[in-house]
Amino acid sequence: MNKTINNNGFYLSMMDFKKIILRKLFRLRIIGGKHTAVEHLTKGLPKHAIGEAKNAVKELIKEGFILQKPTSYGLQVSLNPEKLDEVTQIIEN
């Protein structure tokens, strides 16, 4: 299991990154037709953790929690409205 250390000395697992990303999308109400760039999801993370966070986004897309929308200006993502119940369970745990 890949682990990245953050600025406070704590280790973050892939699941931690997934929770951070899902929580941010949910908090900002980026659901369904409303979308944002992947780069916006990694804002606020330490620079050494951005690659791991982008990998977490790719896994969430494969798992169906995040929908992708390819555009001429880059990949845009949003939460899958059909999986909101599962997303809230993941965020709360």
Image: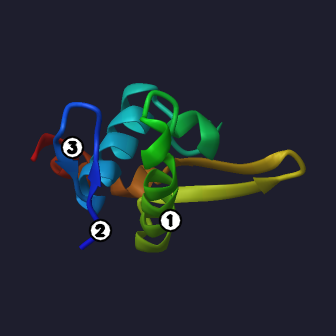
26 left or right, relative to 8: right
Residue 84 visible to the viewer:
no
Residue carrying label 3:
91
Closer to the chain start, of discs 1 and 2, is 2
Where residue 93 appears, x then y in whole percent? Answer: 9, 47
Q: Residues within 10 Å of mark 1 (few under 14, many from 20)?
A: some
Q: Which amino acid does label 2 sit on?
A: Asn
User: Disc 1 versus disc 3: distance between alpha carbons?
Assistant: 16 Å
- Dot 2 lies on which element? loop
Which residue is nearer to you in this view: 50 or 34?
50
Residue wearing tag 2: 2
Residue 76 seen: yes
Q: Residue 1 carries which label?
A: none
Question: Hey, which residue is sitting farthest right in the picture?
Answer: 72
> Which corner quadrant holds the N terminus?
bottom left
What's the residue at 42%, 34% (across, down)? Answer: 45
Q: Residue furthest left?
A: 93
Q: Tell me the kind of residue under disc 3.
A: Ile
Where disc 3 sits, the SS reads helix
Query: How many residues crowd mark 2 within 10 Å: few (<14), some (14–19), many (20+)?
Result: few
Q: Where is residue 7 in the image (x, y as percent from the top left)?
A: 29, 33
Q: Distance between the residues labelled 1 and 2?
A: 19 Å
Binning the other alpha carbons within 10 Å of mark 3 as few (below 14), some (14 to 19) or many (20 upward) gives some
**Residue for point 45% across, 26% down:** 28
